[in-house]
Amino acid sequence: MILSQVVKGFQSKVITNSYLFINLSMVDFMKHLFLPLLCLILLWNLLACSNSNSESGRLEEKSIDPQSKIILEESKEKGDWESKENWESKENWESKENWESKNAQSKTITDTPDLIANSIVIDGVTRTYFVYIPDAFADVEKLPLIIDFHGGSGTAESQYYLSNMQSVADSEGVILVYPQAEVQTGSVWNTLHSSEGNKVSANDFGFIAELITELSLIRDIDDSRVFVSGYSNGAAMAYMIACHLNDRVAGFVVMSGLFPLESEFPCLITSPTPGLIFNGTADAERPYSGMPGYALSVEDAVEFWASSNGGSTSTTSQIAENIERSIYIANDGITEVQLFTILGGGHDWFDFPVNGVEMPSFIWSFLSQFSS
């Protein structure tokens, strides 16, 4: 309507000014009449196209059945679920969660390819142990051996990772053995001979004795360089193997463990026995002061071994802000027992460096000096 009024006004203006029009030059005509008229025509076309598109859009929307629109939207959502959500919940599970689940069940195989599982029967019970043989020394005979005991409720595989001796074994040619306590009885080592106070009834002393014998036969190990180590309940087992199988053990390493010495079952010490002892003063599980009726204090355990080695002289130094090192040298001038007291230390497998040497290397540098 506005456009019609504009046109009528324009026509009126043309008629009333016809005289002027006649006298206008061609340039004036283009300037005053033709160009405005052209703009009006273009504006008219634009308005017409806009109305046409708007109406066309409304008609197109109305032509879609509401139910069809719902189905279309549901189909779109389903397609999106198939391409993304379903991929994340199914394909991702297949490629990640299920992979992790399967690999968690075969951690020993994937992460420790050189651990070899073996078993022997002791008193009618099948006992398991794992052996690590460095590839470069696979065909070498008379290699030294370290038997490494896991803590209570632990596993042989967990001790493999905890003590972290593989690199030393690879470079120095050492066979590592990780025995497994009886799983059926809680994976706890039987460190006592007496039945009183015994946590389990497993014949672990017989198990380790047979294990050493078997490895001597099938691997021809160096029988004079068999060492034991352990953590917590495994440390107590290492203490007791060094005590009761002393003629077959050249030295020991114990971390956060106590010595459950039994007066009615004395140790069978046949030769001086070197050892490394690590304990924290704040260990709540294996108190530094010992466990009356079960285990000696840490200091009494050190004195026992120093005395059993034929007497000794001792020196104490502070190797770190919270670590004291006491060295007991036997009268033979060779055998040592070293006590590391970690002030404020807890129930841990300690891995601090000693004089700049990483713990695994320090352990072997100490043990490798000795033979039985």
Image (cartoon, rainbow, N blue to C red):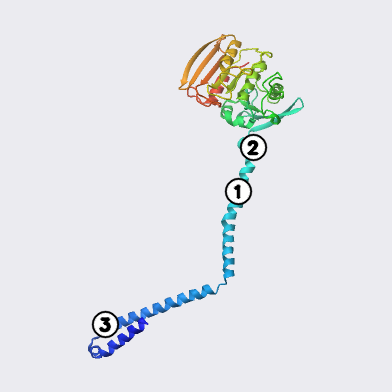
Residue plotted at (59% across, 69% down): 67
Using the numbered discs, state the Cα–Cα distance from disc 2 to disc 3 in whole angstroms.
94 Å
What is the crowding at mark 3: few (fewer than 14 residues within 10 Å), some, or many (at least 20)?
few
- Quarter of the view holding residue 266: top right
For this rendering, which residue is in front, 198 or 102?
198
Quickly name the residue at label 3.
32
Quickly name the residue at label 2.
109
What is the crowding at mark 2: few (fewer than 14 residues within 10 Å), some, or many (at least 20)?
few
Disc number placed over residue 95 in the picture, else none: 1
In the image, which is nearer the foreground, mark 2 or mark 3? 3
Classify residue 210 as left or right of residue 372. right
- Residue 218 spot, x, y in % from top left: 70, 26
- As drawn, the residue found furthest toward the front would be 292
- Residue 318 spot, x, y in % from top left: 47, 18
Q: Secondary structure at mark 2?
A: helix
Number of marks in the rendered image = 3
Using the numbered discs, state the Cα–Cα distance from disc 3 to disc 1 in whole angstroms.
77 Å
Q: Amino acid at mark 3?
A: His
Q: Could you tell me which quadrant the C terminus lies in?
A: top right
Classify residue 145 as left or right of residue 342. right
Q: Amino acid at mark 2?
A: Ile
Query: Which of disc 1 and disc 3 is earlier in sequence?
Result: 3
For this rendering, which residue is in front, 68 or 158?
68
